[in-house]
Amino acid sequence: MPRCYPGAEAAAEILRTNGIHNVGILEHQGFLGDHYDPLHKRLVLSSDVYHGRSLSALGGAAHEAGHAIQHKNAYFPLHLRMAAVGGSQ
């Protein structure tokens, strides 16, 4: 039976698989504040996503890890967003 990772572990595995070793994963106590901070190279996950094993928690963690992959690959729309909002939420 496949292992069901908590969100933080799933995000870490996605990052590792994509050769990203310099992005931290932090927990925050807020609700719906999950984001990738490209200036500080960190994923910030709510407690529900960080520890959660639901599909929505895993999807949220994977989504934020996807932004780190975009950053690594110099995805142009991400650079536009960073220019518009200063790189962090």
Image (tube, rainbow, N blue to C red):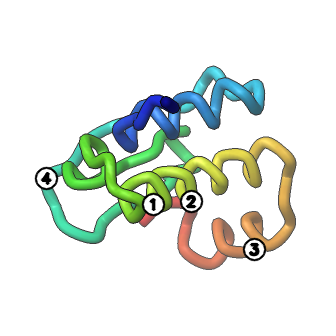
Residue at x 55% of width, y 66% of height: 86
Mark 2 vs mark 3: which is more N-terminal? 2
Which percent across, then down, holds residue 9? Answer: 43, 31
**Disc 1 target residue:** 60
- Front of the two marks 4 and 2: 2
Which percent across, then down, holds residue 66? Answer: 66, 53
Circle on res. 63: 2
- Front of the two marks 3 and 1: 1
- What kind of element bears circle 1? helix
- Circle 3 packing at 10 Å, graded few (<14), some (14-19), many (20+), is few
Circle 3: residue type: Leu
In the displayed structure, 3 sits above or below 55; it is above
Q: Please indicate whether residue 71 sits to the left or right of residue 58 in the image.
A: right
Residue at x 45% of width, y 29% of height: 3
Give 78 or 12, whichever is nearer the viewer: 12
In the displayed structure, 89 sits above or below 11; it is below
Circle 2: residue type: His
Circle on res. 29: 4
Which quadrant holds residue 77?
A: bottom right
Circle on res. 75: none
Mark 4 vs mark 2: which is more N-terminal? 4
Which percent across, then down, holds residue 88? Answer: 48, 60
- Front of the two marks 1 and 4: 1
Mark-to-mark CA distance, 1 and 4: 15 Å
Q: Quadrant of the C terminus?
A: bottom left
Mark 3 vs mark 4: which is more N-terminal? 4
